[in-house]
Amino acid sequence: MPTTKKTAVSLLSLAAPVVLLAAIGGVLSAKVGLFDDLKDGIDPSIRPPVTVTIAPRQMSYRAEGHFLKNGFAVDAPIVVAAIKQPLEIMKYQVTRDDYERCVADGGCQQPEGGHGAGLSGVPMTGVNYTDATDYAAWLTKKTGEVWRLPTDQQWAFAAGSKFPDDALGIDGTKDNPALRWLADYERESSRQRAKNPRPLPTGAFGENEYGVADLDGNVWEWTETCHRRVTIGDDGEVLKEAPACGIFVVNGKHRASMSFFIRDPKSGGCAVGVPPDNLGFRLVRDGRWYSGYLYAFERRLHGAG
């Protein structure tokens, strides 16, 4: 019995500060109007997107980044991640129709061009990172739910068996540094841009095992993960990591890294490899209990209304 009582007291001592902080946060939020963005702009005519919820699991995938060992490029390591919370992600990419509602409402800019211009029922393309995050902010305001770009890890989690493995299987060495360069050249030569890059109607490329559609079509998707350059030791330990947060990971048939302002991949800005055919996006719904606090603080921090 003493043990049970001690455990109960211990749990109470942990829970009390959390409840107190939440209460204080709620009062302060109300005082300064912290949640105005999530309350004032709700529009019942804007329906939340169709989503898929994927149950937590452990997964392994190839890490993102440009990895170096002893000064030579090497394959990124396979990492294991335990995803502890369900992930709710849009089943389809944001469509041109949905994006143009944001434009009409003044929440998004209208990009010029894009292979799907003038088409209905197709993914929105020709958008840069800022366009995608502007749409996420607009959808958050209209629905009262927090929407964000996925991280690279979340995208890999949702992609499942359709997540691409870009390993070459050949690491650069001082004995023959040209081997990896040649393998990389051969791989990129085989990745030809589509003869007809025009986006197809949503669902045209099928679904994966979780019901997420069009993951390996001709539209690459922005994530909120910064590209990075990582130096590792002989045992794989990270010796140095240098994020490049003006460049973000985009995922599709293969990974690419694009400068945040790029809308048309063929115009440049691709850090490595053959550029994507199109740039689009899908969002995840942030269902964490404190997501509203976090979103509101981020908006205030960046001076956004």
Image (cartoon, rainbow, N blue to C red):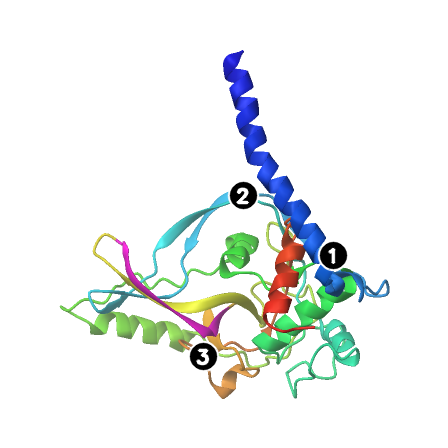
Would residue 263 be seen by someone viewing this image from the given angle? yes
| Quarter of the rendering occupied by the N terminus | top right
Choose the circle earlier in sequence order: 2 or 3: 2
Residue situated in front as seen by the camera: 216 or 297: 297
Mark 2 or 1, closer to the camera: 1
**Residue 166 to residue 113: above or below:** above
Q: Residue at x 50, y 16 (%)?
A: 3
Residue span colored magenta: 236-249
Q: Amino acid at mark 2?
A: Lys
Disc 3 target residue: 270
The answer to whether the residues at label 2 and label 3 have Cβ atoms under 8 Å apart is: no
Q: Position of residue 257 (x, y in %)?
A: 46, 73
Residues at marks 2 and 1, CA–CA distance in whole angstroms? 31 Å
Q: In the drawing, does residue 53 fall left or right of residue 39?
A: left
Q: Position of residue 53 (x, y in %)?
A: 65, 49
Residue 38, located in which quarter of the rendered image? bottom right
Q: Residues within 10 Å of mark 1 (few under 14, many from 20)?
A: few
Residue 205, located in which quarter of the rendered image? bottom right
Q: Position of residue 233 (x, y in %)?
A: 23, 57
Q: Amino acid at mark 3?
A: Cys
Residue situated in front as seen by the camera: 22 or 112: 22
Q: Residues within 10 Å of mark 2 (few under 14, many from 20)?
A: few
Q: Position of residue 237 (x, y in %)?
A: 27, 54
Q: Residue at x 53, y 53 (%)?
A: 157
What label does residue 41 carry, if any? Answer: none
Disc 1 target residue: 30
Q: Residue at x 71, y 64 (%)?
A: 140
**Residue 252 to residue 60: above or below:** below
